[in-house]
Amino acid sequence: MSIRIKLLLSYTGMLVISLLVFVLTASLFTIAATGDIHGIRDFYKVHYQINPLTEEEESIFLELKYLAKNEPDELQNKELLSEYDFKLRTVRAGLYVRRDNDQIFESNTMNQPELEANLPPYDLNNHQIRNTLNIGERFYAYAKYDFRYSDGARGSVYVIRERSPFGEVTRKLLPILVLSLVGIVVVANVLLYRWITRSVVKPLDLLRKSAEHIKEGNLQFSLDLHSKDEIGQLNETFENMRKRLHESIQLRLQDEENRKELISNISHDLRTPITNIKGYIEGIRDGVADTPEKMDKYVNIIYTKTTDLDKLVNELFLYSKLDLKQVPFMFEHVDIIGFIDDCIDEQRYVLEEKGIRLEWKERTGQSVEVIADLEKLKRTVLNIIENAQKFMDKQDKTICVSTQLSPEWVTVEIRDNGMGIEPEAIPYIFERFYRAEPSRNSSTGGSGLGLAIASQIIEGHGGTIWVESEPGIGTSLYFTLKRATKEAV
């Protein structure tokens, strides 16, 4: 059973219960007004028939009316009238008989001195024989019949019952009030059902349609419900799930593209040295290297290409293990100043042979310890320096290394005055196999894994790595390491 049907049945049940309560209340209200549980039927039956008397009173009135028509003089017999008055008093009514302007009989039940003056005039045609009248604050209902005595005198017989004004108001207004309340309850239930349906069922239906979109693979939509209730929270959770799922799919597609690009790059970078090796080996087999000098040259080239190939495979293997978090880090306290000083000494003479000046703005006598894996940190620095030297395009080639200290971090900067990096290439330089230099020439672009490996190592240390560059001026590459102590700068 759907929620909509359950809501409809629940509100219908509440409506029926409310109506029963109203009917019961109206009944009790009527009993309180009439003072007689048997008078409920007569209370409204009389009302709709414009008859102010109860059934018992009406029966006595009809007997008196019969006497007035057939034996009018009997209505001057006070003993007979007293008997009828006694019957009327048992049902809390009274009798009044008049002859012309004289009173013949008045029941003690009324006890109203002004009754005679307020009675309606004679109407021998008897157009209206039942009505009500007010005398001061007292309210009476009556039935009368005008007739003539045998001597021609006019006569009237009245059966009168005093009623509460409150009872009369109740008699007239209670049906209207009950109908109004029933209408209000019905309208309120319809509006409440509509409101609940719009605020609960409609959002749930929208969530169902959204789930069907997801099932069909369509994630290009959004839920724009902004309610703050549980449905709104469910909607927000569902929308976050959709976004995460969409991001996951996009990431998977991107990973697929990266995988294809990776395979393409690996294929190219492996095929180039293999092709060269194959060519030189064929040259040897074909006798092209027919002198010892040529043979040594071919062998050295084959060795160099093989070494490059081995280096590429090793770097790819290392990057893969770093990317899969399968490389353990052996952290220790390392003096970063002394460590960089050793790296500079190791690389200075190699770079000088290539015409590159390596500067180190060291802080003499100051020891700054960081938490690092010494071997992997050295590989990071060498990879960055090696990457920088490949893009030198000026006569005066310079690589400058410096550090900046903060209470918690050490920032190492390696700056060169090479050709720089275009702004659109900066976000991608730490991706595997990416080369800002468009051709995949290993002599200038390298394997494309050096900075990717450096990024993985620094992230493994809990630090960050980034680059700043101006085309034609140079590039600065920064990375941070956490200090082992919080000594002052």
Image (cartoon, helix red, strand yellow):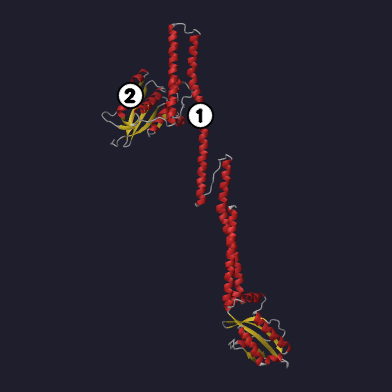
Residue 100 got which mark? Answer: none
Q: Is residue 381 above or below residue 250?
A: above
Q: Is residue 187 above or below residue 244?
A: below
**Residue 424 placement, left or right of 200:** left
How far across and how far down the image is residue 147, in percent? Answer: 71, 88
Q: Secondary structure at mark 2?
A: helix
Q: Amino acid at mark 1?
A: Arg
How far across and how far down the image is residue 306, in percent? Answer: 44, 17
How packed mark 1 is, by other alpha carbons closer than 10 Å (few <14, some 14-19, many 20 or more), is few
Q: Residue at x 52, y 37 (%)?
A: 249
Dot 1 corresponds to which residue? 259
Dot 2 corresponds to which residue? 344
Q: Marks 1/2: CA distance?
A: 37 Å
**Is residue 443 among the parts visible in the rendering?**
no
Mark 1 or 2 closer to N-term? Answer: 1
Query: Which one is in front, 131 or 476?
Result: 131
Of all residues shown, which one is farthest toward the left?
A: 365
